[in-house]
Image (spheres, rainbow, N blue to C red):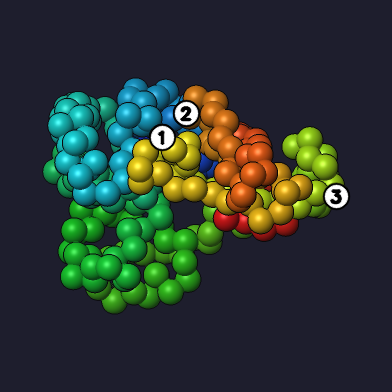
Amino acid sequence: MSRAPRIYISAGEPSGDAHAAAVVTALKRRLPGATVEAFGGPDLEAAGAAVLDRMEQFSVVGFVEALWKLPAHLRLLRRVRLGFQARRYDLVILVDYPGYHLRVAAEAAAAGIPVLYYIAPQMWAWAPGRVRKLAAVRRLAVILPFEEAFFRERGVAATFVGHPLKDRMPPPPRADARRRLGLDPARPVLGLFPGSRDSGRRSAMRRPGSSPRAPTYRSSSPGRRAVATLPPVPPACTWRIRSPCSRPPTPVSASRGRPPSRRRSLTCPW
């Protein structure tokens, strides 16, 4: 190819945004002149991709919420299809998020654009018969060793590339992690990890008493402190864990950043 490549990369949720950002960083090292456009979030933006569509409004959990967001996904798919048909890209990279990305793969293949799918749908667990939906994918980059053989046996060109968590910096020692979070090293710490999707956090972490179905988190230790880890997308929040009997609620610190370093500060994760 005589010119610098144009690449489209797509990630529909915060975890995928982080993994996609690592891919873009690696691509920029090898192909510094490449143009990368994206459907994604702040991590992709920080990695140097031009984010054409923001992912925050699209992340969903559950069948009902997926139906509610379906019109928005179809409008996004229509815009992406037009870009593919105009031959704007030399390569399409899709990261996880199979409900939407399998449709994107089909659109890219129809436009004659090769597709690299990174982090395979877990079809080996829930739908082996749906592997045929990956027919539009030129190369599948899998992160679990057994996935390569599983997909190759079913006609998909799969390559094991290692798990992205192995490339992360190791978390700090527990004492350092607590010091960075401003936690008393002598007090027990309970960690809350409600997931990367905003809707999942709202469901799992709703303030006690705000709904008859809202969960109540109880602390069995009066000196316990809780830390909730949030990705950078949603607004800052603070919750409290309801303590049993007459003890006051346990304060919860909403800490932004990647979970591994937060986990190192814990006495007990949740």
Q: Secondary structure at mark 3?
A: loop
Residue at mark 3: 186
Please state which amino acid type lies under the numbered disc 1. Ser
The answer to whether the residue labelled 1 contacts the one labelled 2, judged by CB atoms less than 8 Å apart, is: no
Which image quarter is the C terminus in? bottom right
Residue at mark 1: 210
Q: Secondary structure at mark 1?
A: loop
Compared across the picture, whether 112 is left or right of 39 comes to left
In the rendered image of this protein, does residue 136 appear above or below residue 125? above
Q: Residue at x 79, y 43 (%)?
A: 178
| Pick the front one: 57 or 24 | 57
In the rendered image of this protein, does residue 127 appear above or below residue 258? below
How crowded pointer 2 is (Cα within 10 Å; few <14, some 14-19, many 20+) is rated as few
Please state which amino acid type lies under the numbered disc 2. Pro
Marking on residue 234: 2
Camera-side mark, 1 or 2: 1
Q: Residue at x 66, y 56 (%)?
A: 220
In the rendered image of this protein, does residue 153 appear above or below residue 100? below
Please state which amino acid type lies under the numbered disc 3. Ala
